[in-house]
Structure formats: structure tokens, C-alpha cells
Image (cartoon, rainbow, N blue to C red):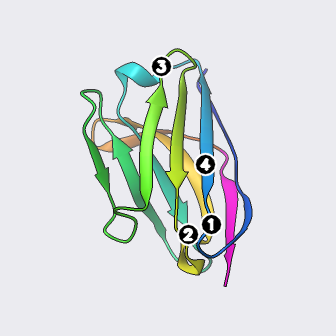
Amino acid sequence: QVQLVESGGGLVQAGGSLRLSCAASGIMFGINDVGWYRQAPGKQRELVASLIIGGSTNYAESVKGRFTIFRDQAKNTLYLQMNSLKPEDTGVYYCVVFGGFTIRDWGQGTQVTVSS
């Protein structure tokens, strides 16, 4: 059974930084395409960043240059480093594992709130 457990969310002032973590059990991040989604209040979930098996990354335009997705294979943990945070980055952030063109597994989410 796959479990994805996010942590690292919280309240931060605009311009600040947070690092989200996603610890996995039942699955190996190193042999799966993974990513981070977020859902802002009243909005649909959106893909923030993805990391494929070969190491290539993709980011939403709104976070390019500010967010970095990376994994620690030894710890089987996925991270999202978020710098220069803006109030519009507020939302619940979810760790995901892709299965082809769909999302196979979701974490429970961690709340990020950026105050202005």
C-alpha cells in the first residue's frame, strides 16, 4: 500500500521560504514520475512542479525561478523548495505519483499560507 506523507507547510510572510517534504512508503520515488500539486481557495488543483525518472523537471509559469523540486533517493523523499513566496502561493500542497498520464497516488496535503 502506497503512503505519501507531506510536511513542512505553515504560515510565512511574503518573500519568505518554505521547504515541503513528502515521505513515501510502498513506492520508490526514484523509479516513478512525481510532482507537486496545489489547490488555492476556490480554485481547481494545479500542477506546480514535476520530476520525471530521468531527472527532468517542469514548473508552472507562476513558480519558475522560485520553486525547485528534487528528491533524495536514499531517504525516498520528495521535496519542494519554495523561495520568494507570494500570497498567491497560498493553498494546500499535495505530493503525487504519476501513473502514465494520470495521477496514481495522492498525499493528504499540507497547508501553505503566505501573508502579505
Mark before the other along the chain sequence, 2 or 3: 3
Along the horizontal axis of the image, is 47 left or right of 40? left
Label 3 packing within 10 angstroms: few (<14), some (14-19), many (20+): few
Label 2 packing within 10 angstroms: few (<14), some (14-19), many (20+): many
Majority SS type along the magenta span: strand
Contact (Cβ within 8 Å) of mark 1 with mark 2: yes
Mark before the other along the chain sequence, 4 or 2: 4
Q: In the image, what residue occupies the spot 55% across and 66% down?
A: 39
* Horizontal and vertical percent position of residue 105: 51, 37
Label 4 packing within 10 angstroms: few (<14), some (14-19), many (20+): some
- The residue at which mark 2 appears reads as 85
> Label 3's element?
loop
Q: In this view, does 31 lie above or below 56?
A: above
What's under tag 4, amino acid-wise?
A: Arg
Contact (Cβ within 8 Å) of mark 4 with mark 1: no
Q: Which mark is residue 16?
A: 1
- The residue at which mark 3 appears reads as 73
**Mark 3 or mark 1, whichever is nearer to me:** 1
